[in-house]
Amino acid sequence: MAVNYTTLKEFMTTIYDSAKRKHPAVEELVSLWKYRDLIYQLVRRDIVARYKRSVLGVAWTMLNPLGTMLIMVVVFSRVFRGTENYAAYVLTGIICWTMFSQSTSMAMNSMVWGSQLIKQIYVPRSSFVVSTIMASMVNFVLSLVPLFLIFAITGVQLKSSALLLPVFMLLLFSFSLGIALLISTLAVFFPDVADLYPVVLTAWMYLTPIIMPLEFYREILDGLLLYINPFYYIVNLFRILMLDGFVPHLQTWVATAVSSFGVLIIGWIFFCLKADDFAYHI
Amino acid sequence: MTREPQPDSAIFLNNISVRYRIPTEAIHTFKEYMIKLLKREIDHKSFSALKEIDLDVKRGEIFGIIGRNGAGKSTLMKVISKVLIPTDGRVWVKGHVSPLLQLGAGFHPELTGRENIYLNATLLGHSHIEIESKLDEIIEFAEIGSFIEAPLRTYSSGMQSRLGFAVATAWQPDILILDEVLSVGDTAFQKKCIHRMGKFRDSGATVLMVSHSIDQVREICERALWLNKGQIESLGSADEVCTMYQNAMSS
């Protein structure tokens, strides 16, 4: 049987030397790139496995936020009568929040699944978290379909600012990945984090203008709680781009970018520094 | 003992120690941990799974590792296959190490056999192109036939293990770890597996054989290592080490 390396050079250079390791945060990044085909397979698995056994398949991703929106509109439209186009307001909030809350919770669970493998073979430890967040981004794109539908029904016209959507998605991705890395690391060492996190998420959602109008937070909470809430910047940016239809000020961009990339960098370094200990604990 | 790996080294371990920190009482929750941390009541006992191991296995060598349960054999294999980063010391390994994967650990029940081959093989670090070129061979070796497009949950456990084994051994490793005897499928399939292992060995792979069967180690291996409570009890020619081990066990 012939030796199966693409080149002899690759064969000669596959040396693992624990004395010559780079900084864990750099090494994990290099390793993740080497295993990019694995990330693709894991993303694919997440998406395919989720829809294979359900009749409506992909449609659920679109029907879910639409259903929640309908409930909110029926329940709250009289309470928040002052809000212009409440349906579109609440739907923009819901699809951002769903992406964030679902992806981070699922990433934590996939880490538990992955820990079975991490004990047996070497794979970049971050693969499971990264791939879960990526698969959720695909769902986010699908959930834009019902949003555009509601826009069409309620007469919202997309402006050219919507072209900046990819930039927004990069920020949403970074923020979700950062938080997912932080809580997944904690969940490896303390299993009760998995029980605690949904409670934290519920509290966090009510502190963020997802369902209730912005004025409510400005008047009652004095605005302060808004400005220290990183997710406020994200949902705010999304609504400016999609609903209000103008290109936001530089300071809005800076605030969102600093909080999203900041969380990602902190999460990444924290995860990588603790990753070597995973095999000792799980 | 040299401090640097030699040109003909395949595995080089220098002063390897693995210490697990075990809290003297179990702390399972984050809440408990925070309370104990604030009260400064966390106490750790350390348990050494491996202590100051030095080892230099040459390329192409057939090397046996013996010892009782809990002696640190599995921990040593994990260190070599990069799963566990040692607490102290240097580990140097040249080339690909065969996976220690429990067969089928990376499978997903809803995906088809074909999709699972891709998933499993990428977990083992192979690229998409590498897998494509081996796909037919894997399917044939696993004897899956027309089931290849069916979801894995419809497979019998024998079919699942055959598929797992076929993927894990589709690529020739530089370092082959044989952990206990293979117990996959029926006798005919086992013969096929042993034949494939023999081929790997013949084409120059370094073989690490972890075994309870002393006679097997004495027969096949050139050198052997006896691990006892995480330390090297004896290292040398397989015949000598096995005799010493047997004498110690029978006394």
Image (cartoon, helix red, strand yellow):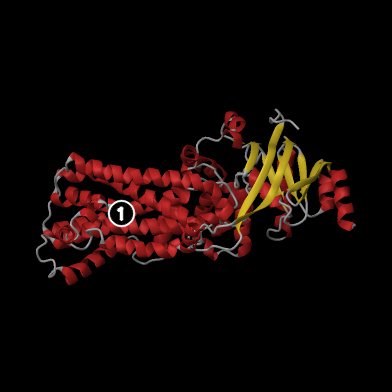
* B170 left or right of B192 in image: left
Residue at position x 34%, y 43% from top?
A262
| Position above or below: A202 against A26 | below
Label 1 amino acid?
Answer: Phe
What is the quadrant of the N terminus of chain A in the image?
top right
List x then y, in percent, for residue B109.
51, 62
Q: Nearer the viewer, residue B187 or A195?
A: A195
Q: Nearer the viewer, residue B6 or A195?
A: A195
List x then y, in percent, for residue A208.
25, 58
Q: Nearer the viewer, residue A139 or A97?
A: A97
Residue at position x 21%, y 68% from top?
A72
List x then y, in percent, for residue A40.
44, 47
List x then y, in percent, for residue A194.
44, 62
What residue would you read off at disc 1? A140
* B23 left or right of B178 in image: left
Q: Nearer the viewer, residue B200 or A195?
A: A195
| Position above or below: A7 against A251 | above
